[in-house]
Image (cartoon, helix red, strand yellow):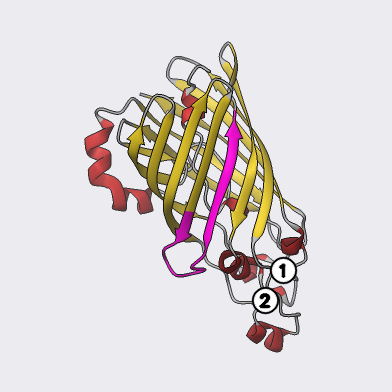
Amino acid sequence: MKESASLHREPSFCGRSGSVAGRGFFYPGLWLTLFLPIFAMQAAAAAEVAVGMGGSVTFAPYKHYDTQWLPMPMVDLDSDYFYIRGTAAGVKIYKLDFLEISAFGTYDATSFNATDTSDARLRMLQGRDASVAAGMEVRLLTPYGMLHASAARDILGHSDGWNGTLGYAYSVEFGPLELIPTAGVYWTDSRYTDYYYGISDRESRNIGLTAYNPGTGKAPYLGLMLTYSLTATWDIFCNGEIVFLSDNIQDSPMVGRSQIRSLAAGIMYNF
């Protein structure tokens, strides 16, 4: 399989169960603070650097929850030792032409804001905060596509949980148009799932909702990314994903949808 720049930039996932999947989604304040010194050293020697602007829309699974719209700047950087992919930034510990092992940190946008729901009882719940996770990822590039697996743990103490992914992506090119279908499964441990989708005993007593601990979660997903090269340096892209929630998450009193749907689009300039 010919190595694709877009496939190579397919972002790492951890905690995507309420976040937006997309190329190059990047929160500058967070990553520039953490990685600016390394970014500066690596940017000059990076094999691939791109910047741009885009936006995303996410339909979260919570009951009567507002559609989440988010415009944002984007950065993709990939060198022999360091990368920024989506909301993840990492260091490559081991790299061959067909294999990459990295340690990374990632912003996990999964969250619940009580003011974003019109459900009277859910508006009385405590918020569930977005977080930052740190973990490891393995990528295997084969003639038949890219296989990847990752696992990471919340390091801000919100859920203290683990989450990860096992996925597959394949690149198909038609001249300036590149299509990348993706498929896989997201996994979350009981602490992570209980934090974002559970109802505590205290909340149950105060609000009247049934206490609920969903336990571990497994969510298959399907996605499609389209990239079109306008010129040698300018690309536009669109990325959609649908996540199928497990029954135990769907049964939560907080949840009103069986799926999470997200769509992102933007324009990138490649240096």
Residue 156 percent across, percent down from the top left = 42, 66
In the picture, measured across the screen, residue 205 lies left or right of residue 169, that is: right
Instruction: Find disc 2 in the rendering and name its residue.
Output: 199
Q: Residue at x 50, y 23 (%)?
A: 235
Overall secondary structure of the magenta section? strand
Dot 1 amino acid type: Met
For disc 2, the neighbor class at 10 Å (few under 14, some 14 to 19, many from 20) is: many
Q: Would you say residue 158 sits in the magenta stretch?
A: yes
In the image, the segment drawn in magenta is 152-169
Q: Position of residue 240 (x, y in %)?
A: 65, 37
Residue 164 x %, y %: 54, 51
Regarding mark 1 in the picture, which secondary structure is present there? Answer: loop
Within the image, what quadrant is residue 38 found in?
top left
- The local secondary structure at tag 2 comes to loop
Q: Quadrant of residue 200?
A: bottom right
Image height check: is 159 above or below 238?
below
Q: In this view of the protein, can residue 26 be seen by the observer?
A: no
Q: Position of residue 85 (x, y in %)?
A: 44, 39
Residue 69 part of the magenta segment: no
CA distance for labels 1 and 2: 8 Å
Which marked residue is nearer to the observer: mark 1 or mark 2? 2
**233 to 13, vertically: above or below:** above
Type of the residue with mark 2: Ile
The tag earlier along the polypeptide, 1 or 2, is 2
Tell me, yes or no, whether the two marked residues, 1 and 2, touch with CB atoms within 8 Å.
yes
Task: Return the residue nearer the eye: 30 or 255.
Answer: 255
Image quarter in which the C terminus is found: top left
**Residue that mark 1 sits on:** 254
- Return the mark for residue 125: none
